[in-house]
Amino acid sequence: MRLFHVSEEKDIKVFEPRTPYRKDIDQSKGMVWAISEERIMNFLTPRNCPRVVYHKRSDSTSEDVEKYMGKRDLNAVMAIEQKWFKEIIDTKLYIYEFDTENFELQDENAGYYISYKTQIPVKVTEIDDLFQELFKRNIEVRLVPSLWYLFDEIKESSLGYSMCRMGFAQDREK
């Protein structure tokens, strides 16, 4: 297993545990968050870029797979709003890899791991072409005017999904 943190910040030397901002997580302890290699694709965009990423699970129906992914053998589909296209082209990301020793699984579906200890990255990789990085990982990128129809439909499907930064998505009416 490999664990990562994706950031637009260059040269982070130390990751200190921070109190989570989400109210559904215990806020009495600071944490360092990491993402599994399998789900890192969900974070290969600018931080605030809203996105709907979905993938086939072992219990996904063939109807849902064909409807939302087609007949190709994809690892996942990432839908982003068209207005983010230029920002994705202009953004560099840094992938920080951690030693996995002090991490524990927080959310299996999302691929989230947490550590209550300070972490020092063991490796940093710069990504300057986000689209190419997604394509290299066999992710199909779809540019859409609005994410809300997918947000509603994918949640009701049998597919696995991640829906990030939807607060920055176009209004539902558009």
Image (tube, rainbow, N blue to C red):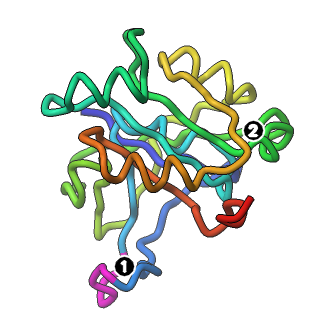
Q: Nearer the viewer, residue 148 or 44?
A: 148
Left or right, residue 123 beside residue 33? right
Residue 26 colored in magenta in the image = yes
- The residue beneath circle 1 is 30
User: Where, quadrant-wise, is the C terminus in this rendering?
Assistant: bottom right
Splitting the image into 4 quarters, where does residue 50 fall? bottom right
**Residue 106 marker:** none
Local crowd at mark 2 within 10 Å, few (<14), some, or many (≥20)? Answer: some
Q: Residue at x 48, y 29 (%)?
A: 77
Measure the alpha-carbon separation of dots 1 and 2.
Answer: 27 Å
| Image coordinates for residue 86, horizontal then vertical, percent | 86, 38
Q: Residue furthest left?
A: 59
Left or right, residue 53 beside residue 106? right
Q: Nearer the viewer, residue 137 or 55?
A: 55
| Image coordinates for residue 166, horizontal then vertical, percent | 58, 62
Where disc 2 sits, the SS reads loop
Q: Is residue 144 above or below residue 135?
A: below
Q: Please state the extent of the stretch shown in magenta in the rendering.
A: 24-30
